[in-house]
Each structure stands twice: as C-alpha cells, then as structure tokens.
Amino acid sequence: MNVCTPLVSVIIPCLRHADSLGRCLPPLGRQAIDVAYEVIVVDSAADPAVAAVLGQFPFARLVRSDRCLRAGPARNLGVQSARGEYLVFTDADCVVSPDFLAAAYQALAGGCKMVGGPVLNVWPLHPVATMDNLLQFADLAAGRPEGAADYFPSCNLALRRTDFLAVGGFPDVDLPAGEDSALCRRITATSPEGIAYVPGMMIRHQGRRSLTALWRHQFGFGYSRAVLGLFLRRKHIRLGACWVAMPAVMAKRFCYIFGRLCCWHPAGVLRWVLFMPIFVVGLAGWAAGFRVGCKERRGA
C-alpha cells in the first residue's frame, strides 16, 4: 500500500460490525492501484471490538463519533477527516475486488462525476442471503454493461470530494436506508451526465441470513424510500399508503427485479425460482415498509 499523501480516500462506516470488518479490510490493503490511498473506518458506536480489529491493520485509520450515528452521517464524518481528492465509499460487510480502487480512480480521473459497480454475494449458495442481495442490488449485476446510470448504493460509490461537498454530502436523516439514493438524486440533478456504471468496481456483499433479518432489512428499505419520496410522484405516495395497493406494489417490484435478472444475470433465474418463497418474504417486507412510509409522508 502506498503511504504517500493520499489521492484517494476510502471511507467505511461501521456500527457494531467488527467481525465483518475483519473480512473487509484485508483486500483494501492489497489494492492494485499506482496512486496513494488511505482507508478510514468510522466507528459509529465507540465499539472496543472495532478498535481491536483496526489494531491488526495499521494501514487503516479509526475515526470515532461521540454519539451513535446512522450510516449517512457517519460517512460525512469520515469525509471531514479524509485527505484524498477522490472519495470512495464501501461498507464493513463488503469485500472489494483487487482492482476496485483502480477502476474507480481511473473512471473519475477520466471525467466521470460519480461511479459505482457490481455488487455480488459473499454467500452465493445461501438462499436467504442470495434473495436479500437480489432485492437490493438487481441493478448491479456483473453482466450489466458499462455505461450511464442514475443510482448507486453507498456500499459501492465513488466521486470527487468537490462534487460531494457541493451537494452537501449525505443527508443527515435518522433512517435505516435511503441516504445513498438521496445523494445520487442530488448529483444527477446538477450533473445528469457523467454518472457511470463501471464493471471493474466489483464488490461482494454479505446479505442477511435469516428470514427475520431479511424482513426487517427490506422493510427499512421500503420505508425509507417512501418517507424520503425517492423517485416517487404524489400519486405514488397516495396509492402506496393504501393497504389494498400492496399487491400491486409487490407485483411492480417483482416484475422490475425479474426483468433485470433476465437481462443481466439470466443464469440466476433458476436459483431465483427455487428460492421464490424467500424472495416473496423479502418483497412483502419491502412493500409493508413502503406503505408505512407513504402514510407518514402523506401526514407530514
């Protein structure tokens, strides 16, 4: 790892994920990139276990919050301590590929405003983790071609510091998800061109591995999207608040994910069919959260 003044800063929020962090950090210390970079871990809960893990990886720097933070504000705190011109975000429950940083840096240095890449599954044979990842990352399959995009999750997202600061960073919201979509919306509003999907920016994500965790996770995603009004019109909010519309909400999302699967990962269709009951559990959790979020937004 290059130890000169960093040009690239990798920022990882960590909220009581010390075990996952121990799998996340080693690949970040072995990146095939010819410019200096730094790795910053933001401990959002003053967890001694997180500090203990970082003690094994001297290339990573620890930033601690004086209060418990959601992921978005934790990333903003990491940016305050970052020295790089280019910001790369991933999560403690992710494992990056050897060329991850090089692909991100080259795309941004080449003129892109914001970039992201494939999000695969750490446990591809685990049925719940597989469906959890599919529900979250259907747009980010390895088979998707390089080109224009309008959204990336914060576990695989990179942009220049100046562009990040110009839009105010991640929104400071007390929500389980959605801060990445809100940031992407801010970037696309000011720079509709230059948002690119980069296949070389590949990571693997550790999906939830129990039905209860799957439901809660997807509920949070649906809820956050509705409360923030992300990519939604007023009529969507009005209809989404009605329980009788839940089957239609589920059907629409079902068709969307199935279409992406057929287009960019047709080999995964058979596994999707086999794990369909689990997929429906996660889909129902998302729809339930979406309905609650729509009700709250209508009443706001």
Image (spheres, rainbow, N blue to C red):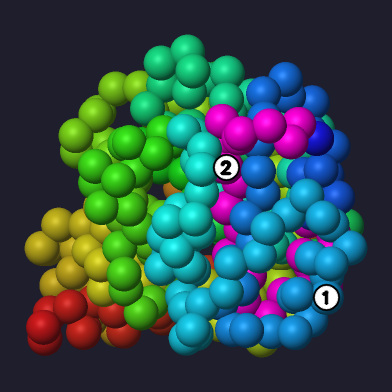
What range of the chain is rendered magenta? 2-24
| 149 and 59: which is toward the camera | 59
Q: Residue furthest front?
A: 4
Question: Where is residue 282 drawn, in percent x and y?
Answer: 58, 72
Residue receiving disc 1: 52
The local secondary structure at tag 1 comes to helix
Q: Residue at x 72, y 20 (%)?
A: 34
Question: Where is residue 169 drawn, in percent x and y?
Answer: 33, 53
Looking at the picture, does residue 102 appear above or below residue 214? above
Looking at the picture, does residue 130 appear above or below residue 140? below
Q: Residue at x 25, y 28 (%)?
A: 192
Residue receiving disc 2: 9
Q: Residue furthest top?
A: 110
Q: Name the image quarter holding residue 8.
A: top right
What residue type is disc 2 on? Ser
Question: Where is residue 231 drawn, in percent x and y?
Answer: 25, 52
Question: Where is residue 261 drawn, in percent x and y?
Answer: 61, 41
Looking at the picture, does residue 63 appear above or below residue 102? below
- Indicate which disc, 1 or 2, sits on the residue closer to the N terminus: 2
What residue type is disc 1 on? Ala
Query: Which mark is drawn over residue 128?
Result: none
